[in-house]
Each structure stands twice: as C-alpha cells, then as structure tokens.
Amino acid sequence: MKKLDGFDAAMFGVASVWQRDEDGGSTQVDTLIYDGDAIITILMHRDDMTFEEAAEYVDFNILNAYVGEDTPLIVWPLGWDELEERFDDEDDDEDN
C-alpha cells in the first residue's frame, strides 16, 4: 500500500476497492484512507500554512495525484449536523 509521507497522523483506515485490470477484468486491492481535514490541519501547523494555502496544496498535490492502483483515498468527514442539513436540503428539493 502506498502512503502519504508525513501524514501518518491523518490515517483513517484501510479500504478494499476494485480496480480495473489492463485486460478488462478487475482486481481487489487494499488502499489507505486519510482524513482530508486532518491533512489540512497538519499542513497548517507543521508548515505554517493558512487554511487557503493548505487546501490549495491538498487539491493540487494530493487529490489530483494518481500513483497507481493503490493510490490512497482521501475522505472528508461530516458531522451529524452537516449530514442532517444535507438530507434536509435534498428533501426540500424533492418537494419542489
């Protein structure tokens, strides 16, 4: 499994994902999962970046990087309030 150097504290877990093979089949591979919010926090504290600088760094250097079939996954956790707000917004959209 490939890992993001310098971001061990942001590791969230491992996921088993299916990747398409060159021959058209698929293979299950394990890949590391990282907490995107924690990565930004690490950059802000460790590298003295602003939130905007850290978010831009993550977007350009991490989210847009494909390093092979076991490229790490980045998740952006939401709290219950945020999830509930999203579902309420979807319900409102369906009512219209």
Image (cartoon, rainbow, N blue to C red):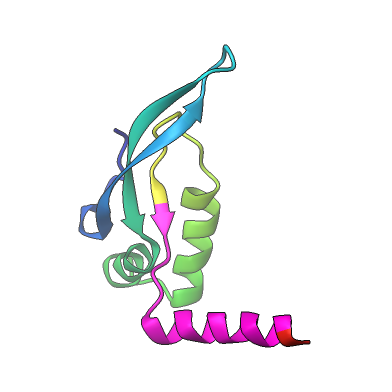
Residue 19 x %, y % = 48, 29
x%, y% of residue 4?
32, 45
The answer to whether residue 9 is above or below residue 23 is below
Span highlighted in magenta in the image? 74-94
Examine the rendered structure and indicate whether residue 37 appears above or below residue 29.
below
Q: 27 or 96, which lies in front?
A: 96
Question: Is residue 19 or residue 47 the one in the foreground?
Answer: 19
Residue at the (33%, 71%) spot, across then down:
41
Residue 29 at x, y = what percent?
Answer: 36, 30
Residue 29 within the segment the image draws in magenta? no
Q: Determine the residue located farthest toward the front in the rendered image.
A: 95
Quadrant, the C terminus: bottom right
Does 74 sit left or right of 42 as displayed?
right
Q: How many marks?
A: 0
* Nearer to us in this view, 41 or 17: 17
Q: Determine if the magenta segment contains residue 90.
A: yes
Q: Residue at x 38, y 82 (%)?
A: 80
Q: Residue furthest left?
A: 9
64 sits left or right of 29 in the view = right
Magenta residues, dominant SS class: helix
Q: Furthest-top residue in view?
A: 23
Residue 38, how many percent across, how many down? 31, 66
Which quadrant, please, contains the N terminus?
A: top left
Q: Is residue 86 above or below residue 55?
A: below
Q: Is residue 63 above or below residue 68?
A: below
Residue drawn at (55%, 53%) of the image: 60
